[in-house]
Amino acid sequence: MNFETHIGLRYLKSKRKEKFISFTTWIAISGIAIGVMALIIVIAVMTGFQDEIRERILGINPHILVISLDGDIREPERIVAQIKEIKGVTHASPFTTFQAMVQSGRQISGVAVKGLNSKDIAFVAKLMREGTIESLETKGNILIGKELSKHMGLLLGDTFTLMVPFGGYSPMGAMPETVKVKVGGIFETGMYEIDNTLLIMSLKDVENIMGVGATGIEVKLKDVYKADELRRQIIKQLGTGYFARTWIEMNRNLFSALRLEKIAMFIILALIIFVASFNIIGSLIMTVMEKKKDIAILKAIGTKKKSIMRIFMVEGIAIGVFGALIGSFSGYLICEIIRRYKIIKLPEDIYYISSLPVKISILDVILVASVTMVICIASTIYPSYKAAKIDPVETLRYE
């Protein structure tokens, strides 16, 4: 350990008669620690919410959606076989979707009906709250969202009317058609819009209503973050006439808003650390005033200005390091307690989750610690410069 570091660390402790200096040092450390702790907790909560939303979206929606530029896909089996040949694709299945109206008693609501093969909806099984997905194998059965069942007053086994605007044909052209369907199951995704508007039918039942042909192909991937790369491979494999969109593109506005909010909160809470850094400046200035005679003696025996600056920069950086370590440990500990014991409860009817989601990212902790150190180093420059400018002659003249 060089003498600058040794003296700088010694200056963290004051003499017995100047206990106030030591007290201000602890205030500076506490301010940094509280700022770091708050920043880590907030970022962990926001990351947890973002991951929770992503999982809910990917639980019901495809990772890549393939559609034909010419309208319906007439040979979906051939397209599915081609897509499954691509490495990284775990599942591909055709689907048909159309808009309709649901009527039960006096209640009417607009919905989106999605037709899927019964063997291709295993991912819906974990979302079921009542009934089973096997009920779709019975003609006329349908799966509805939990919110829609509440809104329409429908229970498992109830029958209601599905009105399809262009389901029938006459000499005059397309005309509305009404179909009697039965609630075979109730699912819950946790996304209000989906649970309130989505109906799932077997693809055979949908083809009986709308005719043969698939609206598109749903693709599931092994790694969801390679969606853009695999999208290009799919288009290359299928050739012209097809278009594909990834789950990121289909939810770009939502994730952009979450990312912007996370950045904004990071900047706002980083200001707490910035304000706490003024405690470091105040503590160092008071230490300089206390150690003015010592500084003069050091300069009189030949210590350079750079060494004097290093002494007080070491003291300021030490305060920042201790504060960052205490804050990081406290933030991690609190996040782990919240995550493990779920001590913060949320109303499920509003957030669809029972407790506050928390996810700690090591990269976020490193980023917070790095920003803290940059701010702390910057805050030591002015007091260290003033210490180096002390004139030993004027200071020691009357000693």
Image (cartoon, rainbow, N blue to C red):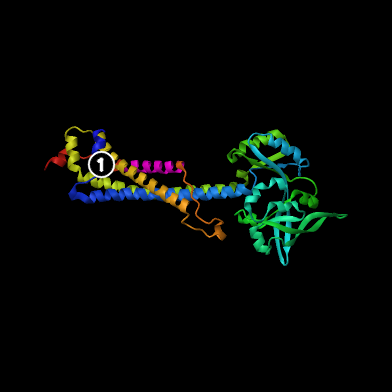
Q: Is residue 152 above or below residue 324?
A: below
Q: Secondary structure at mark 1?
A: helix
Query: What is the quadrant of residue 67 in the picture?
Result: top right
Amino acid residing under circle 1: Lys
* Residue 89 appearing in the image: yes
How many numbered marks does the figure carry? 1
Q: Is residue 284 left or right of residue 273?
A: left
* Residue shown at 61% from the left, 56% from the top: 192
Question: Does residue 378 belong to the magenta stretch?
Answer: yes
* Residue shown at 60% from the left, 49% from the top: 57
Q: Is residue 128 left or right of residue 140?
A: left
The residue range painted magenta reads: 363-379
Q: Secondary structure of the magenta portion, mostly?
A: helix
Query: What is the quadrant of residue 350 in the picture?
Result: bottom right
Residue denoted by label 1: 386
Instruction: Tell me residue 244's x, y (percent).
Output: 67, 40
Q: Residue furthest left?
A: 398
* Residue shown at 61% from the left, 47% from the top: 58
Question: Does residue 188 belong to the magenta stretch?
Answer: no
